[in-house]
Image (cartoon, coloured by chain):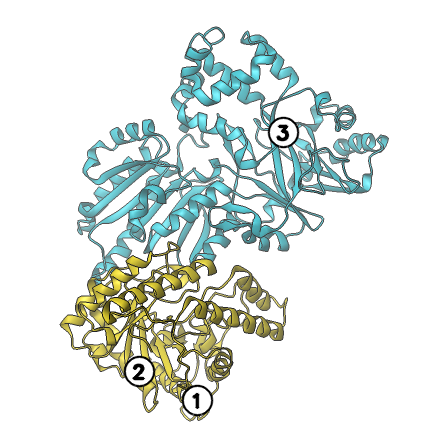
Chain colours: A cyan, B yellow
Amino acid sequence: MLVEVRPTKKLRGARALDLTACLSPIVDALCEDSLDLSRLRLVCDWVQYKNNFRDVIDVRPILSQPNQNGRAGESDEDKLEIAVDLRRCADSDLAEIVRNVLARRDDPDGLGRVYLEDWSKGTTSRIWEFNSLYWRYLGVWEKATGRLYEQALPGGESDARNIAGVHELIKEMFTVWDDLAAHNSLPDELYVIELGVGNGNQAKTWLDEFAKLDVEHGTEYYRRLHYMMCDYSEHVLALARKNVADHASHVSSFALDATTPMTALGFLRYKVFLVYISNVYDNLPTEDVAQIGGHTYRAEIRAYLPKDAATTIATDFGIEPASLVGAIDKLLSLGPELLVDALSAPFPDVARAAAFWMAVWDAVKLEERYVPMTGLDLYQIAPGVNGEMLRPMLERHGDVRMQVSNGAIASFVDTLPLLHPYGRLQCHDIFVTDPHQYRTGFLGPGKYDGSIVNWVNGPLLQHIGRRKGFDVGYAPFAHRAGTNIVTLTAQVRD
Amino acid sequence: MPLLPTSVVGSYSVPEWLERLKTDFYLHRISPAHLNEIHDVAIKAAIKDQEQAGIDVVSDGELRRDNDIDYLLARIPGVSILNPAKSYYYDYFDAEVPEPLSSTRESSALGLVEDFVYTRSQTDRPIKFSFTGPFSLSRRIRNSAYSDRADLIRSLAHALNTEARELVAAGATRLQIDEPFLAGYPDEVGLAIDAINIVTKGIDADWALHVCYGNRYSRPSWEGHYDFLFPAVLDAEVGTLVLEFARKGYGDLSLFARYPWERRLGLGVVDVKSEEVEPTDVVAGRIRKALEVVPPERLIINPDCGLRHLPASVARAKLKAMVAGAAAVRQEITGSPASQPSTETEES
């Protein structure tokens, strides 16, 4: 049996975790079972997100064939991973939980779960429909919680609006433009793109400061500036446009999916001097891959509600238990406002529909299994990027599980062609910057308000960027202490 | 050669698996002998693809070369590679010239002759053999030897002149100098042309000069217009100027009306930075546009640049479209059915 304890920092210091107390009842319970312990992995994380998709103990079959139904034991070669959340161990009867999940591992019905979907690869799971719902109906969520999105961020505001950071970036652009102008190579139109513009606060800050600094600089770059605000939501863009009304003649807005910016902005290929992105990548769909015992697996997931939670929600909202999944389907497809029209009895108003949404979201968990991959080249990370890009990380770092950050990579590779030879992409987000972090920390998924958060696979982005001719660097966000935010900068190399 | 002969610029599609194997070599996972055999097989396939597409003048696809610079720089005596390890084969080496290069070398040292001989053994078609020019090579060198960088460029040109002499002695008749960095330094075009003339001096070959806006990682390194080449390029001792147009548009063709370039133009008719395959009629239209300023007997049809970054299927399709487009225009001009792909051999 292999035991992997990832949060090693928690094992030392005044408030050190009592690992023996956690593991002892688990190992005892495992030894009571007939399970082949030599085929067992016991992996321990510290799930730092209070709202997350994990149980204290989860069982994950490691399949030997790609087309199995997912129950361990279908083949003699199948293995099992038992995942433990050490943060919640002290409050749980671990031995009893282990006995319970092992007894029912071959009988999904026995686990009493209300499944919201069949097994799926991570990016197509229904949890991303919840994520999308959050951004589409952010106003409804904010009204229900009484708290604006930015207030939920660490520090209470987006790092994108940090004046010192904005000044530094603009001044660096002025230096590049001055040099190009000196060689008669500066284009007439100077394009800047922001992906994920939100309420437009960042755009306003940036444009206000740009205009001020341009007056000081005396080169009239503002006159040539075109700021392209891009967001998934037309509604959000309308709000953002109001926010930057003072700069209206310099601003255009585009409703687009951050993963495919070229669909709307292809006409700007090689013309953009700055693409600015803040807190977008961590919120885009991802899949996980794992290297286990020299073999590569894709983590498949299945969203469910624990039976007790499902019963409580159905009771609270006056829904027949058998109709609960149907009501969730309607919520995800129609949104909370139209749900009031579609199911008026349980949801007489939007506030009640929002309460249902929040209750379901709070209860959603993920079941996982590992499915063997049949060749990295056959795995599509994102359009035009296949799994071969994962090979260096998988080969160099032993047994490791990591996010592929598919959505972030799709966005990244579809953004790079926009950049002028002297342009740059700057992105503030939570990035893994060293593959070793995957062996020592829990990096998602977590629930962040109504959205999903995963740390972004920085080394993979760096590797892919490099293969496309870009130097990709990471630096701690320089303008606020104590933040996890990292600044990615991508620029043409050579 | 038929009217409007078709050719390539040099590099051919590098399959993903070959990139992996090239990188494996630098990670010491495969031997130089195995890599050499792999290159031999890949070059055979590249030549076969070009022949099947109907290309009149083929190349070895430059498949032995990691990139446009290192293959030559690492072999020039006196150029020091500071760290010969790479984590990705396509990366550039960090090269330095610590002392002035020897000017007394009399024989080939760069290995291009062996590459040409192998290519010659694999096809009966005429072969174009390309190598990067002294100006672009110099841009990737840390110069610690010459107070005037022009002297470094001229020294590199002399080394290439020696190699070209050996290539011609081995049977090469069509040689091309690539200057992918020149467009980034338009003020230095005179120096670059002087160096090119050192490379070609005394070599009895059909010389071409290729100038583009860069194709590193399938991206342009610079943007601009070919105005900067003129009139300096009129002094270049080359018979063909090979330029990119398909990606940038054909506005710069007007330069050939404004300046007395009485030699051949290698016309880029397919964009190597896009995987979209140009329809035959689009290719034909681009050729007709060029014919407004360049007579057909002085026009060669080629892609914008090397095909290395395109998937093989796209490269094949683009070459076929190019050949078909050229054939269509050729038929319009001659009034006879389109010529079959050339069967002319290098010796014929």
Q: Is residue B247 visible?
A: no
Looking at the image, residue B49 lies above or below residue A232? below
The residue under label 1 is: B166
Callout 1: helix, strand or loop? Answer: helix
Q: Amino acid at mark 2?
A: Ala
Residue sitting at x 48%, y 6%: A345
Dot 3, crowdedness within 10 Å: few (<14), some or many (≥20)?
Answer: some
Which chain letter goes with mark 3?
A: A
Say yes or no: labels 1 and 3 on the same chain: no
Callout 3: helix, strand or loop? Answer: loop
Say yes or no: labels 2 and 1 on the same chain: yes
Residue B199, percent from left and from top: 34, 85
Residue sitting at x 47%, y 75%: B71
Is A421 positioned to the left or the right of A126 in the image?
left
Do callouts 1 and 3 mark residues in contact (Cβ within 8 Å)?
no
The residue under label 3 is: A54
The residue under label 2 is: B195
Dot 1, crowdedness within 10 Å: few (<14), some or many (≥20)?
Answer: many
Is A131 positioned to the left or the right of B289 in the image?
right
Q: Amino acid at mark 1?
A: Glu
Q: Is residue A185 visible?
A: yes
Residue B296, percent from left and from top: 23, 73
Residue A334, percent from left and from top: 43, 20
